[in-house]
Amino acid sequence: MTELKSTMQTYAKSMQSDIESAWARGKSSYGEAILNVTTTEDTARHTVTTTYKANGQRAWIMEYGRGKDLDKDSPYWKRYQQYGFFNEARRSSNDPSVIRGRKEDERYTDLDGNDTDANGKPFIGSGSTDKAFHNFDLEAEHVIRNVVIRKNARGIAMREAIAKSVADDLSAVLSKAVKGK
């Protein structure tokens, strides 16, 4: 099992790098994008699991979109609407994903926990005129899913390496069982 865990850790680090690069190149430049990847082994259950956990406003936007193009099938959409991050002006619309803007003097806390002015910029006082953040919609890119399940050479090599590790681990277990009889 340790060989499988090692194989999965190797590919998980590679995919983490690809995901972070895609986030850096993405259309959303606002906020944080933090990715934690862990690989754990449960010997009692004979399983190895890799978990990708993303945090930050930029990560959210890159994964699930923004404005009218927001992915309402996101597993977090309902929870997002229940917290103070959600713009209450959207509730009066038939489509609560559409950005409605905020009052010029309104401040709120963004998904990264920053006090933010109505223009989507960290609050440093009045006078900000950059409204770029609220003026366009972005489709969800589902970067994590697309990197992890991709069918390019690295994805194929990863699946082959995992299959080989599983076969080697199974062979070792069977060999040990046969010798024990």
Image (cartoon, helix red, strand yellow):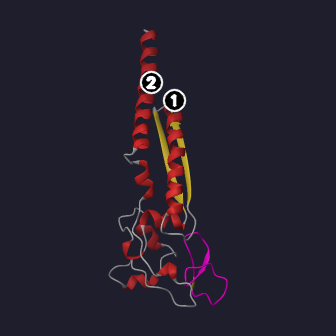
Circle nearer the N terminus (2, 1): 1
Residue at 45% from the left image edge and 68% from the top image edge: 79
Residue found at x 40% / y 32%: 163
68 or 177, which lies in front? 68
Residue 155: image location, x then y, percent: 41, 43
Q: Viewer-proximal residue, 119 or 90?
A: 119
| Percent x, y of residue 105 | 58, 90
Is residue 126 inside the magenta stretch?
yes
- From the viewer's perspective, tell me whether residue 108 is left or right of residue 71: right
- Mark 1 is surrounded, within 10 Å at the Cα level, by few (under 14), some (14 to 19) or many (20 or more) other residues, namely some
Which residue lies most toward the right here? 124
Tell me which amino acid carries mark 1. Glu
Residue 80 part of the magenta-drawn span: no
**Label 1 element class:** helix
Q: In the rendered view, would you say 115 is above or below 32?
A: below
Which secondary structure class fits the magenta region best? loop
Q: Estimate the spatial distance between the alpha carbons at disc 2 and disc 1, rounded to whole Å.
A: 8 Å
Find residue 115 and name its label.
none
Report the front residue among 158 and 99.
Answer: 158
Residue labelled with disc 2: 168
Residue carrying label 1: 3
- In the rendered view, tell whether residue 159 sits above or below residue 85: above
Q: Residue at x 41, y 68 (%)?
A: 77
Callout 2 secondary element: helix
Q: Mark 2 packing: few (<14 Cα in 10 Å), some, or many (20+)?
A: some
| Callout count | 2
Quarter in which the C terminus is drawn? top left
Magenta-colored span: 108-129
Q: Are marks 2 and 1 in contact (CB under 8 Å)?
A: yes
Amino acid bearing label 2? Asp
**Residue 143's x, y, as percent?**
44, 57
Point 43% across, 84% down: residue: 100
